[in-house]
Amino acid sequence: MTAVNGAGGPCRFCGRRRDPRVPGRSGPICVDCVRAGLRVARDGADRESGAGDVLAAVTSPLAAVCDFCGRRERRTFLGLRRPLLRVDCAARDAVICVDCLDHAGDVLNVALRG
């Protein structure tokens, strides 16, 4: 039986069942896809997931919300709204924001250190 957060399912971005993974509301993300997503967020260039699907930066502020946190914008200290950079895999209908990618990287670093 798969957990509600998809922890037992395949990676949302490549479809592989590689460990370790970080669970999300719609399914987990693996180490390789976190790395590729962070590179996309850093320089905006498209990258391939482990399965060969394209990971691309989301350019529209009205595009899909993050599968992990449900946000598409960041609220500043003064209550202003700013678009939140997101990375998507159109082939798998998966989206993750840079904040969740950063958090996933932190979680995976701790898990890999043991």
Image (tube, rainbow, N blue to C red):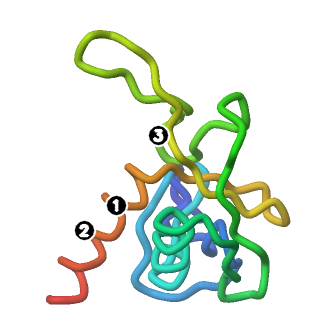
Secondary element under disc 3, as helix, strand or loop, is loop
Give the spatial CA distance, label 2 vs label 1: 6 Å
Q: Is residue 25 visible?
A: no
Secondary element under disc 2, as helix, strand or loop, is helix
Residue 72, by quadrant, is top right
- Check whether the beta carbons of the residues at disc 2 and disc 1 lie within 8 A of each other: yes
Which residue is painted at 53% across and 46% down in the image? 85
Would you say 88 lies left or right of 17 here? right
Q: Is residue 31 visible?
A: yes
Relative to residue 16, is residue 54 depicted above or below?
Answer: above
| Residue position marked by numbered label 2 in the rendering | 106
Would you say 85 lies left or right of 98 here? right
- Check whether the beta carbons of the residues at disc 3 and disc 2 lie within 8 A of each other: no
| Residue position marked by numbered label 3 in the rendering | 69
| Residue position marked by numbered label 1 in the rendering | 102
x, y percent for residue 94:
69, 56
